[in-house]
Amino acid sequence: MATTTGLESLVDQIISVITNDGRNIVGVLKGFDQATNIILDESHERVFSTKEGVQQLVLGLYIIRGDNIGVIGELDEELDASLDFSKLRAHPLKPVMH
């Protein structure tokens, strides 16, 4: 299956997930199944705002249903560590409309 092949290389790597409802969740990919349900460890949600910096809400071990995933991407840890999230401002993502 094409989706499984792409995710296999990301196991035990830090990834960023954008959900269909506009959430940005970052964590270590621990596993997935044929429906692209994923398990993240050491995860947190990044909440964006135009008025204040990015809030990072700790989630810990977290499962995301495959039908709620919009985008999965590998995270550049070096670049991510260099960002000052307290100074970043952005509009929150809007939910996907079907």
Image (cartoon, grey):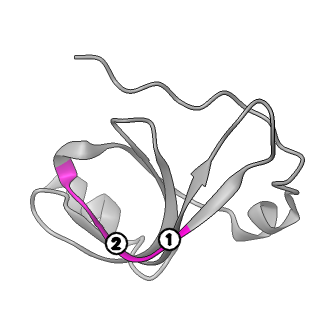
Residue 76 location, x and y as percent?
68, 63
Rendered image quadrant of residue 22: top left
Local packing at callout 1 (Cα closer than 10 Å; few below 14, some 14-19, many 20+) is: many
Q: Residue furthest top?
A: 98
Q: Residue at x 38, y 27 (%)?
A: 95
Q: How far apart are labels 2 and 1 at the CA level? A: 9 Å
| 39 or 5: nearer the viewer | 39
**Which element is circle 2 on?**
strand
Q: Which residue is mark 2?
A: 62
Residue 77 shown left or right of residue 53 in the figure: left
Question: What kind of residue is marked 1?
Answer: Gly
Q: Residue at x 70, y 36 (%)?
A: 49
Q: Is residue 59 magenta?
A: yes
Q: Are the two marked residues, 2 and 1, in contact with CB atoms closer than 8 angstroms?
A: yes
Give the foreground label among 2 and 1: 2
Asked if residue 96 is positioned above or below residue 62 in the image, the reply reads: above
Rendered image quadrant of residue 48: top right
| Between discs 2 and 1, the one toward the N terminus | 1
**Which element is circle 1 on?**
strand
Asked if residue 57 is positioned above or below residue 62 in the image, the reply reads: above
On-image quarter of the N terminus: bottom left
Q: Which residues are magenta?
A: 58-66
Residue 54 location, x and y as percent?
73, 50
Q: Which mark is residue 58?
A: none
Q: Main secondary structure of the magenta part?
A: strand
Asked if residue 83 is positioned above or below residue 88 in the image, the reply reads: below
Total residue callouts: 2
Question: What kind of residue is marked 2?
Answer: Tyr
Local packing at callout 2 (Cα closer than 10 Å; few below 14, some 14-19, many 20+) is: some
Residue 69 shown left or right of residue 55 in the figure: left
Residue 80 location, x and y as percent?
75, 62
Q: Which residue is mark 1?
A: 27
